[in-house]
Each structure stands twice: as C-alpha cells, then as structure tokens.
Image (cartoon, rainbow, N blue to C red):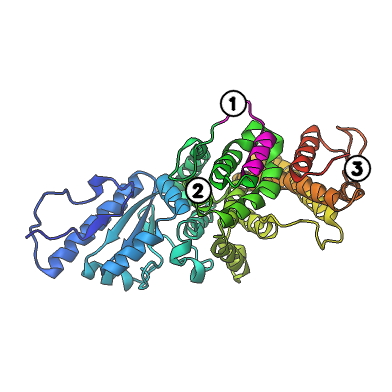
C-alpha cells in the first residue's frame, strides 16, 4: 500500500509539479525518520521552485482532516486567491515529523490553530508575516468568501521590504506583476442565473435609463429581473457614462442593498458579483478596495473586513507594519466607505470636501518634489511609486464625495448645494478658473442629482 506524499498541492494552487515528488513512483522509505527526511527534501524543492519563479511559497500544515479543511478555507477567499495567482505557490505539509520541526523552529512558526497563519518563504528564506490584527485575520465561516485580511497582510509584508537591498530583485518582479494585473471586466449581467435573468441592453444604453427600468421592475414586483438590471449598472454603468460612478456608489448601492433584503435571488446574485470582484482585487488599489467594500455592504458582509482594517490601524506598531500609503488609504476607507446620507447631522458637509482637496494638493506637491530628486535618489523614487495609488484614490474619492454630498445637500434644501460648494472652495463662476468645478465634476453632480431625483440649478 503506497504512502501519501508528505507535501501536497493545495487545491487551485499554481504550484509546479516539478517541485514535488513525481506521482506514481512508490516510496522507498517506510520509517518515520526516513519519511520526514523525504518530506524535508520535498519542501526544500518547493522553496527552490518558488524562488526560481520569483514568488512566495505559502506553507500550511494538515495533521488532521479538520485542520486540512480549515487551511483550505483560510486560503479560499477571492482576494486571497487573487494574491496567490499573482505572487505565490502553495503547499501543505502532512508529515508529522516535519510539522514538529517547523513548529519548533526559532523562525516564524506554523500556527497550531486550524486555519492559522501559514509559513511564508521569500527568496528561499522564512519571511515574517505581517502581524496586523492577527486576532481577526481568520474570519468566521460566513465571512470567508469576502475576506481580504490575509491578502492584505501578505502584501504589506512584501512591500515593507521595498528598501531592503537583499530582496530588491524580488520586489521588482512583485511590483511588475501587480502593475500588469487588470481588474477583470465581469459579465455576470448577461448570464442567466437560476432565477435572475440575463440583462444585456443595447451598447449605447444610458445608465440613468437602465436605473429607471430597474426601479419600474421593482414596482412591478419583478425583483429578479431588477437584480439583473442592477448587475448591469454595477458592471457597465461607469464605463457607459464616466459621470455615473458617484451615483452608483451613493444612490444605486442602497437600492441594491434593499433589493437584496427583499429577494434571496437578488442577494445571491450580488454575492456572486462581490465574489467575482474579489478574484482580481489588488488590496493596494484604494479605488478597487472601496468599490469592493461597498459590494460587501450591499450583501451585509462588510463587518469582518472593516474590523480588520480598524484593528490593524489601532495596533501600536501599525506605523511600522503597514506601508504609509496603505495606512492612509485604510483611514479614508473606514470613514467614507458607506452609502448613508452623507449630510444628515453634519454641520458643514462641504468642509470634508475642502479637506480632501487640500490633502490631494499636498500629496501632489510631495510627489512633484520627490520626482525632481528621484533620478538621483532611489529611495525617493520608491516613495513616489508607493504614493501613486494613494494619490489616485484621494483624487477619485474627492470627486465621488463632492457629487454625493452635493446631491444630498440639495435634496435637504434649495440652498444646501451652493453652501456646500462655497465651503468646499468650489464656487468659482467659470470652469477652468481657480476654485471652479471642472466639466467632469459638473457632469458628476448633475448625474448624481438626477439619480437621486433632485433638480440641479
């Protein structure tokens, strides 16, 4: 009777077969010591294969069926699989002797809890996995599919090494893979589900017209048909009309939330939409992360991720363990990633816009100053590169918040919109003037107002 391999592939792992013992070859050793020695050799082969591909090796261990199931579950979320597909090979150790060696090693140890932290090898050496909010890294079963905690910790761990010369080549390849990654253009809207029909309107369809159709379908009690229309709005609305994004996140999202609460089929559809978004998520991309968290809110599955971010920020060592740009992005996400009325109970809603615009100006000035010295200073060049996603997110967020706060302020009273613009420093008379709305911002305000059912002056 053949013995099972002591090191096995995790399901859906991109681990190369060459890193493992070839299947079909009967083992020649039977003693525990010999099996452990063989397992150790297989692990080293896996480490070498990962190093050759310029990737991490993530190692879990399974000394029982329940432990194995927990490890598989811990790596099963869309964001974690997205990270692994780009940056890692994965292996699972089952040999008891090797497990004992690994867990008693002086370096980072395998967790003795099911689904706990794995070992991570980088460039053939053990890498210390970021310890941000480890008590909330392993989500409850119902929150596993949407969790990005482990993916974020792995990413933070690597990018904190950007200034380490010993790993410079690895980090370059890591950044290149992230730069080449594109968010998948999902097509769930034109796919017939068990209950939600496909919705694929004409290519020139306008998002506001489709929104009217979706609302009419809800009034007619055709909730599943409406779910298909809202799916199109999420997947294609912003590309069909660039001014539609603020309306999608502030007006359409709460309608999707209410529909999910009224129709199990609609909720299942929106969960599938969230899961697809997770399959290509870059946790360093603030815009993508914001949209992803809004989807999590729509399906009432946001608490774990928000708790993780909050706890990670509040740990004493967060300034050292989380890259600065990611830390600032997380702070903004926790404050703005919702679709509640943004002006209700707020004395000066325009002040927040002014603050975001000021922050954006500061970031751009810093980037310009760093860029001037970047050619002669590699460290400064790295800082410019690291700040780029934060600059993009703050720029995007300031426009989204401006449009949604303006529309809701106008809904609260006819003078509310103008007061908000004045407080935000955007009351200039002509587009192009300092302190004036750009044409793109004007379009966003108008579209968001129409979606909310208010008339812009």
Question: Closer to the camera, 306 or 218?
Answer: 218
Q: Earlier in the sequence, mark 3 or mark 2?
A: 2
* Residue 52, placed above or below residue 344: above
Question: Closer to the camera, 229 or 69?
Answer: 229
Mark 3, other Cα within 10 Å: few <14 / some 14–19 / many ≥20: some
Mark 2, other Cα within 10 Å: few <14 / some 14–19 / many ≥20: many
> Residue at the location (48% across, 55% down)?
151
> Where the C terminus falls, by quadrant?
top right
Visible in this render: residue 39? yes
Mark 1, other Cα within 10 Å: few <14 / some 14–19 / many ≥20: few
Q: Residue 59 vs residue 319: left or right?
A: left
Q: Which residues are magenta?
A: 201-217
* Residue 159, placed above or below residue 102: above
Visible in this render: residue 370? no
Q: Earlier in the sequence, mark 1 or mark 3?
A: 1
Q: Which residue is mark 1?
A: 203
Q: Which residue is mark 2?
A: 269
Name the secondary structure under disc 2.
helix
Name the secondary structure under disc 1.
loop
């Amino acid at each position: 009777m053949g013995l099972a391999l002591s090191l096995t592939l995790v399901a859906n792992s991109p681990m190369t077969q060459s890193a493992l013992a070839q299947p079909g070859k009967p083992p020649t050793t039977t003693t525990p010591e010999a099996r452990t020695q063989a397992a150790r050799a297989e692990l080293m082969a896996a480490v070498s294969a990962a190093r050759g591909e310029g990737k991490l090796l993530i190692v879990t261990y399974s000394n029982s069926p329940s432990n194995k199931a927990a490890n598989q579950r811990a790596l099963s979320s869309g964001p974690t699989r997205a990270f692994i597909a780009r940056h890692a090979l994965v292996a699972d150790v089952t040999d008891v002797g090797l497990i004992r060696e690994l867990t008693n090693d002086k370096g980072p140890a395998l967790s003795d809890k099911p689904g706990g932290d794995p070992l991570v090898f980088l460039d053939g050496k053990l890498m210390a996995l970021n310890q941000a909010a480890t008590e909330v890294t392993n989500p409850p079963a119902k929150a596993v599919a949407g969790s990005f905690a482990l993916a974020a910790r792995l990413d933070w761990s690597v990018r904190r090494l950007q200034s380490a010369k010993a790993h410079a080549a690895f980090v370059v390849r890591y950044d290149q893979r992230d730069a080449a990654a594109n968010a998948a253009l999902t097509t769930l809207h034109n796919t017939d589900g068990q209950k939600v029909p496909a919705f694929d309107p004409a290519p020139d369809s306008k998002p506001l017209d489709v929104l009217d159709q979706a609302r009419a379908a809800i009034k007619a009690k055709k909730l599943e048909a409406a779910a298909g229309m809202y799916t199109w709005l999420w997947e294609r609305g912003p590309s069909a009309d660039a001014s539609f994004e603020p309306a999608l996140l502030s007006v359409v999202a709460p309608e999707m939330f209410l529909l999910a609460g009224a129709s199990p089929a609609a909720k299942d559809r929106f969960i599938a939409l969230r899961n697809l978004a997770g399959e290509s998520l870059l946790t360093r991309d603030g815009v993508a992360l914001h949209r992803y968290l809004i989807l999590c809110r729509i399906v009432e599955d946001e608490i774990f991720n928000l708790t993780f971010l909050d706890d990670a920020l509040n740990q004493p060592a967060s300034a050292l363990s989380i890259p600065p740009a990611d830390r600032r992005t997380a702070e903004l996400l926790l404050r703005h990633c919702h679709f509640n009325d943004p002006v209700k109970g707020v004395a000066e809603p325009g002040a927040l816009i002014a603050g975001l615009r000021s922050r954006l100006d500061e970031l751009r000035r810093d980037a310009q100053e760093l860029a001037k010295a970047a050619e002669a200073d590699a460290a400064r060049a790295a800082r410019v590169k690291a700040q780029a996603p934060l600059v993009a997110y703050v720029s995007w967020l300031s426009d989204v918040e401006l449009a949604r706060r303006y529309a809701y302020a106008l809904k609260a009273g006819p003078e509310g919109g103008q007061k908000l613009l004045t407080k935000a420093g955007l009351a200039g008379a002509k587009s192009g003037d300092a302190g004036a709305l750009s044409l793109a911002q004007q379009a966003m305000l108008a579209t968001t107002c129409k979606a909310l059912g208010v008339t812009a002056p």
